Amino acid sequence: MKAINLKEVRISNYRSIRDEQILLIGDESTFIGPNNAGKTNALRAISILFGGYDNLYGYDRDEDIPFDRQSKKTSIIGNFEIAESEKWFWESIDRLHELQGTTRETNEISLYLYFTDTSTPVYNFFTNVKRPQDKKADYSRILRGLVNEFVSKFQVVYIPSEKSISDLYKTLLAPRLSSKAAAILSSAMKELNEELDSINKSINETLRASNINKAKVQIEVPGGSLENIIGQFSLAVTDEVKTSYLSKGRGLQAAIFYASLHWIDERIKESGQHPVWLIEEPESYMHPELANSSKDMVRDLSKKSISIVSTHSMQFMPKTAEGIHGFSISSGSTRVDRYMKFEDACNTLKRSLGIRFSDYYGLADSNIFVEGKWDVYIIKQCGRKIQELSGHPLPLLLDSLVIDKEGTTGLSGFIKAVYEHVRKEVAAVTLLDGDPAGVKARRELQGFFSGRGEFVSNRDFVSVRTGYEMEGVFPDEWIKECYSEHEGWFDDWSVDASDAVEPFSIKDSKKENYAKYMCSKLHAIEVGDDISSELEERLFNLFYVLEDALSAQSKRL
């Protein structure tokens, strides 16, 4: 448990947040929603809670009170859970209880803040409790001292979306590097001052020797602090070559910056404070290739410190709905919703941004999911030729995106994760082998989707020839010819009593050769040539069924 943990924030009458909105702060607190829905206002309000009597974060009633709430007051309430070990806090709280004639019951406490008409902050740890009139001065002194000490225990680090990485480096990392270096070099301060005095003496003696007596040189450490003379540290990055981080790609710059936040987090705690990280749209700095790694670095902050992220990206959303807050505007006022399911949060984000779940995976209007890259090759190489030879139109199939999920397990896992969502947006058909692995996957998927939108054959999925992998969809005569010419391509081989080809498999290293061999035999057929019944019933029919499945889904959509 963190020594001091922020559990909840309530905000009312602050900018677009008119009616009280409740934010639950946990390990993965996330704000989602369209621009101008109030996410930034909520983050700013949280920072203002820690501004103290000096109004450190600049609340201004003229700007911050909603225009139609001039008779109201901005109110921000933080609910904290505080360990019993924080004696400095509980001793003062218990003294306040004693003065007002109440008793403490839990280790949770609320810090109440509102602003007067002159933007003056007013804090309290209790509401609806009368202060003792005979000990009012004593009570006020203890309360003010405790509030000052309490808010000083926190350091708010606000990372806005509009700042550049170089600006963030200069304002967040560089000053702390200088501070750390100054602490290490502080033992040399006396020697440095003595050396500066010696330099001053030498220069001034030279001036006097030249009859310049009215001028006196005094070189000194600016402000008496080493931090003011320690120059900018060089941040270099070595990947293929060592260069300044500013010469690297934007995504790598951002990843390096987010990695540095963990060091900053430790330095803040080292100083005796609790970091409060308020991070706006971390994805705005990201290259997609580094987004997952950077997401983990950002999310890991929340496991050890108070951390709140606003985002437009599903990648930066936690995988459970508990910490997700959906922001929207209703009648000009911010509304915050909570979610029972992660999918509901995803759908809200998609609607608010005008994107679809399928866009996240780069899907097209028509899609076919397959087990391997040579399945992709066969579909793409054979489709147009089959349409030409058969006269059967295949417009959706020919225009479809065929996606390889690298094996039965990968395909099955992908379908379980996304199909319930993407089927509502695009046409997507899964092509499964008819071998035991494909049958097992088909049964698992049908069981998984039972009662969840179904997983129907020849609509949601299509199975190839029973008992066979995709390679078995070609005529037996072609397969026999291939075996007689390239026996080494096959892992196993057999025919039954009727000389029909039994289920077989091709070596992984030879699947390309096999796919190209079969496609070349198809392309050798001319329009008007006889088409064998096996070719039409297996390969051609497979393509017809895929087209019909895509068509049925498109019509449903």
Image (spheres, rainbow, N blue to C red):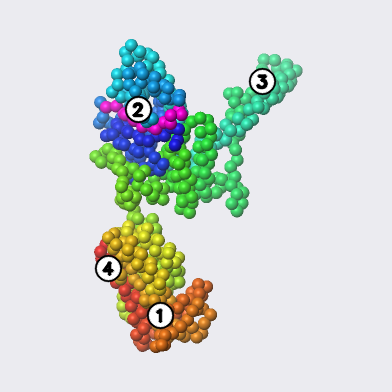
Residue flagged by tag 2: what amino acid is it?
Glu
* Residue plotted at (31% across, 36% down): 22
Quick one: SS at disc 1?
loop
Reading the image, the residue beneath label 2 is: 105
Quarter of the rendering containing residue 110: top left
Quick one: SS at disc 3?
loop
Relative to 458, is 360 on the left or the right?
A: right
Quick one: SS at disc 4?
helix
Residue 515 visible in this rendered orientation of the protein: yes
Mark 2 Cα-neighbour bin, 10 Å: few <14, some 14–19, many ≥20: few
Q: Are marks 2 and 4 in contact (CB under 8 Å)?
A: no
* Residue plotted at (40% across, 18% down): 142
Mark 3 or mark 1, earlier in chain: 3
Residue flagged by tag 1: what amino acid is it?
Phe
User: As displayed, is residue 495 above or below residue 438?
Assistant: below
- Work out which quarter of the rendered image holds the N terminus and state it: top left
The label on residue 474 is: 1
- Work out which quarter of the rendered image holds the C terminus and state it: bottom left
Residue flagged by tag 4: what amino acid is it?
Ala
Relative to 553, is 252 on the left or the right?
A: right
Mark pair 2, 4: CA separation: 63 Å
The residues colored magenta run 72-86
Q: Are marks 1 and 4 in contact (CB under 8 Å)?
A: no
Asked if the stretch drawn in magenta spans residue 81, the answer is: yes
Q: Nearer the viewer, mark 2 or mark 3?
A: 2
